[in-house]
Image (tube, rainbow, N blue to C red):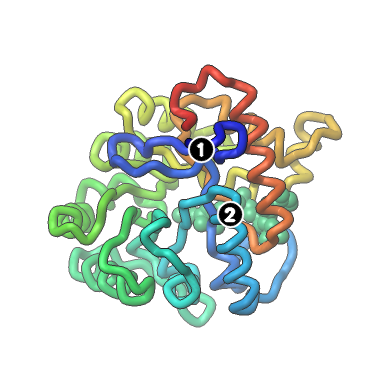
């Protein structure tokens, strides 16, 4: 019987049947250090550091990893370095590529299928738990025109993908994605609250919600400036996010095991303040 005081909280991801840790690990920084908007430059961690990061994450109770073809070598490195694949929930994406320092986009059904097949190969697996449309900003068009969504639905029916959704950039697109798919990934933090109605709609329809940029992509000084306090900006950001009902998990990107442990402790504190949350295991 797991000890409720030490087991990291998990939540059901909408109606997908996937039980995700309330903190996921974003893996941009293990595969790409060009064209990113973090406060400081960094070198990609070596294989041993990535192995340690993944082992620490798993020890701390994290079971959700977020990657994408657009994150440079992230998928390939995870495929090579991840152990116990069956114990992880892997989220990847389709539509965006990043080559020679530049992003390009192709949301055709043909490219969606090719991209998923390549993700399966790179991640060395025969199924992906979650695949999101990696929006270029034209959320509604991508959902309602062309054959991107249909291609994902077919891959899901074929058993190659368990859950499909969209990483959105607009509120209208988020609301539509909540209707048409299993989950959304939205930006939400104390300084970016536009997607609140999307999270509320997802809660209403029992769809999954993953949060990106919850720690403002590392620009945490802005949180203290806003609330004029000396509180830990990590904890206040996470407290803000989990005060919103409907959030399944926050995907925080880090290549620091110290930061990872701090984030896990903060999520634990923030969520367990509300012991009435029935979804905590
Ligand atoms: N689908 C999309 O369009 C999209 C877009 C952006 C992001 N994402 C996903 O969401 C994930 C998170 O987004 P993000 O990486 O932009 O932003 P984020 O998670 O808000 O912030 C990551 C940054 O915060 C720093 N950080 C993490 N924990 C910290 C702590 N305890 N103290 C101080 N600094 C800390 C990290 O640096 P250290 O490495 O030094 O800890 C990193 O630079 C990404 O990894 C990716 O998986 C998706």
Q: Is residue 218 visible?
A: no
Question: Hey, which quadrant is residue 134 in on the image?
Answer: bottom left
Residue 143 lies left or right of residue 190; in this view the side is left
Q: Secondary structure at mark 1?
A: loop
Residue name at image x 74 percent, y 46 percent: 220
Residue 248 lies left or right of residue 59; in this view the side is left
Residue 255 position, x and y percent, is 65, 63
Asked if disc 1 is less than 8 Å from ligand 1, the answer is no
**Of 55 and 188, which appears nearest the observer?**
55
Marks 1/2 in contact by CB < 8 Å: the verdict is no
**Circle 2: is it few (<14), some (14-19), or many (20+) Cα within 10 Å?**
few
**Of 119 and 101, which appears nearest the observer?**
119
Residue name at image x 63 percent, y 58 percent: 254
Q: Is residue 127 visible?
A: yes
Question: Hey, which quadrant is residue 5 in on the image?
Answer: top right
- In the rendered image, the residue lying farthest to the bottom is 100
Residue 233 lies left or right of residue 127; in this view the side is right
Task: Mark 1 or mark 2: name the one nearer the start of the chain.
Answer: 1
Q: Secondary structure at mark 2?
A: helix
Note whether 99 is above or below 129 in the view shown.
Answer: below
Distance from disc 1 to disc 2, alpha carbons, whole Å, reads: 14 Å
Note whether 115 is above or below 145 in the view shown.
Answer: below
Question: Hey, which quadrant is residue 44 in on the image?
Answer: bottom right
Residue name at image x 28 percent, y 35 percent: 15
**Of 72 and 83, which appears nearest the observer?**
83
Residue 43 position, x and y percent, is 68, 75
**Label number found at residue 59:** 2
Q: Which residue is mark 1?
A: 2
Note whether 32 is above or below 13 in the view shown.
Answer: below
Classify the position of ligand 1 by quadrant: top left, top right, bottom left or bottom right. Answer: bottom right
- In the rendered image, the residue lying farthest to the front is 1
């Amino acid at each position: 019987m797991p000890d409720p005081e030490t087991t990291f909280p998990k939540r059901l991801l909408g109606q997908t049947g996937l039980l995700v840790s309330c903190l996921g690990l974003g893996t941009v920084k293990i595969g790409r250090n060009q064209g990113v908007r973090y406060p400081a430059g960094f070198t990609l961690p070596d294989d041993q550091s990535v192995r340690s990061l993944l082992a620490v994450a798993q020890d701390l109770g994290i079971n959700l990893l977020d990657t994408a073809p657009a994150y440079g070598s992230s998928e390939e490195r995870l495929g090579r370095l991840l152990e116990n694949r069956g114990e992880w929930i892997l989220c990847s994406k389709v539509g965006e590529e990043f080559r020679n320092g530049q992003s390009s986009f192709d949301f055709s059904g043909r490219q969606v299928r090719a991209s998923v097949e390549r993700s399966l190969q790179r991640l060395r697996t025969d199924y992906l738990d979650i695949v999101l449309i990696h929006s270029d900003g034209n959320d509604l068009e991508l959902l309602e025109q062309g054959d991107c969504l249909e291609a994902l639905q077919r891959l899901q029916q074929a058993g190659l993908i368990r859950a499909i959704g969209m990483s959105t950039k607009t509120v209208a697109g988020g609301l539509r994605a909540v209707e048409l798919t299993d989950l959304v990934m939205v930006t939400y933090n104390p300084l970016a609250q536009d997607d609140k109605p999307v999270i509320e709609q997802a809660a209403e329809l029992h769809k999954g919600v993953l949060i990106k940029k919850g720690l403002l992509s590392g620009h945490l000084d802005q949180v203290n400036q806003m609330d004029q306090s000396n509180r830990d900006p990590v904890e206040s950001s996470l407290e803000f996010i989990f005060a919103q009902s409907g959030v399944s998990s926050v995907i925080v990107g880090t290549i620091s095991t110290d930061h990872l442990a701090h984030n896990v402790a903060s999520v634990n504190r923030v969520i367990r303040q509300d012991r009435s949350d029935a979804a905590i295991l």
